Structures are given as structure tokens and as C-alpha cells.
Amino acid sequence: MNACVEKPIVLTGDRTTGPLHLGHYVGSLKNRIRLQETHRQFLLLADAQALTDNAHDPEKVRRNVLEVASDYLAVGIDPEKTTICVQSALPALAELTMLYLNFVTVARLERNPTIKDEIRARGFGRDIPAGFLCYPVARRRLTLPLSRRPSCR
């Protein structure tokens, strides 16, 4: 008989574009504090994704990695219960994104409603940074491996 009880896995995170605020707390952080008790939780400091529309100021993105991590700790995220990781420190994530990009067309990426709205809001026109356009692939890449891999702590 298996002595360990498997917890469901949760992977979420934040782009490191600035300090978190009350909206983050109400919208997600409060729930993450609760989930760390019942789930195997991973929080991703998405610095590579933050560069997609902040490439002009990489120092801001770097600085905000520590800011967002500090905000996690300040609201009660416990690093003994939740794994906090930095996206750029996990080369396998970039490798999986490159692999998955071979299975999606640019036309399909451009039809993504969220991406379409963000392209308009940021005024990119046709000058869309490739990393920004590929954001949905990077997001999906994070859910596939975790959703199929049972684990037990």
C-alpha cells in the first residue's frame, strides 16, 4: 500500500513587472496562501515573460524578481510548503517552449483573444515582439508536464 498521499499540483505565478498590490492579494494571493495547505504548489517568478514587453528595461525586471518574492513572503507564502522559482533559472522551460512552438502557427497565436487585446492595448500594431506573441505557448508548456506527472512528497 502506498504510504504517501498525493496532493494535486498547482502552478501559478506572476510576471515580475512591479510590486504586487492589493488587487493581487484579493485576486490570487489569498487563495495561494490557502492552497499551500492542500496542494503541492509552485509559484513562478515569470521574469522571462516580463521581458516580452519590458525589454527596454531589463534591470526593472531583475529588480522586481526580489520585490515579488518578498511580497510572497510578506503575505504568508511559506517556502517550506510552496516552491518559489525564477523562470529564467529553469532552462527546461525555454527548451519546452521552443519544442511546442513547432506545433502552432503564427496565425493561431495572433487569433488568441487575450493576445489580440494586449497587442491593441500596447499599440504594437504589426511590430509585435516575438516573445510576446509566443506567450500563450509558454503558458501552455507549463501546464502540460505537470498535469501528467503524479508525485508525492
Image (cartoon, rainbow, N blue to C red):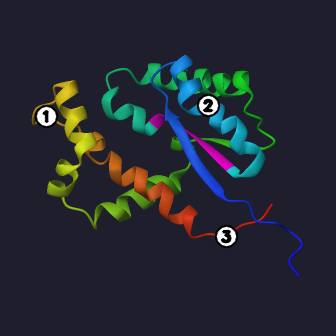
Predominant SS of the magenta segment? strand
- What amino acid type should be assigned to the residue bearing mark 2? Leu
Residue at screen point 10% across, 37% down: 126
Q: Position of residue 27 (x, y in %)?
A: 53, 30
- Residue 82 visible in image: no
Q: Position of residue 119 (x, y in %)?
A: 20, 34
Q: Position of residue 116 (x, y in %)?
A: 19, 40
Rounded to the nearest angstrom, the CA distance separating label 1 from label 3 is 41 Å
Q: Position of residue 78 (x, y in %)?
A: 77, 35
Identify which residue, 141 or 147, lies in the foreground. 147
- What amino acid type should be assigned to the residue bearing mark 1? Asp
Magenta span: 41-47
- Left or right of 146 on screen, residue 48: left
Identify which residue, 130 or 74, lies in the foreground. 74
Q: Earlier in the sequence, mark 3 or mark 2?
A: 2
Task: Report the quarter where the C terminus lies.
Answer: bottom right
Which mark's residue is nearer the viewer, 3 or 2? Answer: 2
In the image, farthest residue toward the bottom: 1
Q: Which residue is tagged 3? A: 150
Q: Secondary structure at mark 2?
A: helix
Q: Which residue is tagged 1? A: 127
- What amino acid type should be assigned to the residue bearing mark 3? Pro
Identify which residue, 74 or 102, lies in the foreground. 74
- Residue 133 visible in image: yes
Which mark's residue is nearer the viewer, 1 or 3? Answer: 3
Asked which quadrant contains residue 98, the reply is bottom left
Q: Which residue is tagged 2? A: 29
